[in-house]
Image (tube, rainbow, N blue to C red):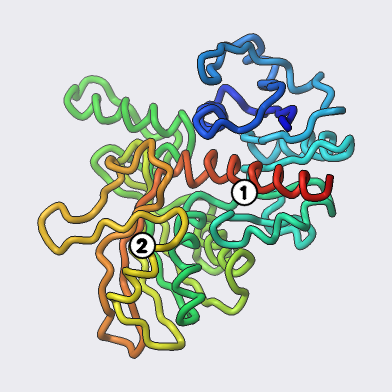
Amino acid sequence: MGYRVAVVGATGNVGREMLNILAERQFPVDELAVLASRRSLGTEVSFGERTLKTLDLDTFDFTGWDIALFAVGSDATKIYAPKAAKVGCVVIDNSSLYRYDPDIPLIVPEVNPEAVHDYAKKNIIANPNCSTAQMVVALKPLHDRAKVKRVVVSTYQSVSGSGAKGIDELWDQTKAIYNPTDDKPPKTFTKQIAFNVIPHIDVFMDDGSTKEEWKMVAETKKIVDKNIKVTATCVRVPVFVGHAESINIEFEDFLDEDEARDILRESPGIMVIDKREDGGYVTPVECVGDFATFISRIRQDSTIDNGLNLWCVSDNLRKGAALNAVQIAELLGREILKKG
């Protein structure tokens, strides 16, 4: 059985990656519509060996379509996702619009696949924030063993997390460093990103945290366990693709680092590369294009009774967005078949 699938925002970085992953994972597509805004109408995108022209999202009729993967911002999603859902097309949304709605499941398939059963409440499923997705993949199997009490996470997030404009700004500023007459002031970011790090992602909130940091707290609670305490510092770094995170975990029960390493090695979606030697860990440039969430630098934290530190790296355009959405579609497909 195949599905009629629409990819909304097919010309963007995440939309194109969704098409790549649908093809790579041989998702059962009977018919595919690639949708974009009117200004991108007719732009060609690739799906496996096929080349498709984008259709106008504004005039597209979702009636009779099974699944729509949304990779557009919250403003457009607010308009078009309810239209699709109303006519029976299940929306898998990559924006932040629906993540905190109690009637809409927020899913990372390796962590809370059972939540897909709730999709029918509104015919919408939310995809988590990219920084949250990779962290909860690492947390869940350890939580099942020793129960996570508190997480302190510092992120090192690539510029692709802010879209094509972020990638272009890093590229242009990097070139301008070597050409003093070619000034490239920041536009996408609040300060120069080339050869710099910026401890500011999304808007500031009243308590001094940023919205990105708040997302990690709220989403971890919704996906894994509402009782987990999370504090985050999110930093933009001059890397094109791939997010890294330094994660400190406090457990209720003692968990030995060797047992943690074994648990993670056996857990879905995780690749452990953890050798205590030069280069015995994974960095963002090495994870690009890979499906896995990579874990390195697993070690005991001796400053607390039940603590571990680890290093977590993932391709944010894949696991942090497009791959997770396609994995949700696979879960959804199995759920539809079960009901059928």
Q: Nearer the viewer, residue 40 or 125?
A: 125
User: How many other residues sit within 10 Å of disc 1, few (<14), some (14-19) or many (≥20)?
Assistant: many
The residue beneath circle 2 is 265
Camera-side residue: 267 or 149? 267
Mark 2, Cα crowd under 10 Å, few <14 / some 14-19 / many 20+, is some
Q: Secondary structure at mark 2?
A: helix
Residue 307, position in %: x, y?
34, 81
Dot 1 amino acid type: Asn
Looking at the image, which residue is at 63% across and 11% down?
53
Q: Which residue is mark 1?
A: 127
Q: Position of residue 303 (x, y in %)?
A: 27, 86
Vertical relation: 245 (above or below) 86: below
Q: Is residue 49 left or right of residue 244?
A: right
Which of the 4 image quadrants contains residue 312?
Answer: bottom left
Q: Residue at x 58, y 55 (%)?
A: 108
Kindly indicate whether the residue at mark 2 contacts the one at mark 1 (C-beta within 8 angstroms): no
Q: Amino acid at mark 2?
A: Arg
Lower sequence index among marks 1 and 2: 1
> Marks 1 and 2, Cα distance to the nearest angstrom?
25 Å
Q: Tell me if 195 is positioned left or right of 306 in this view.
A: left
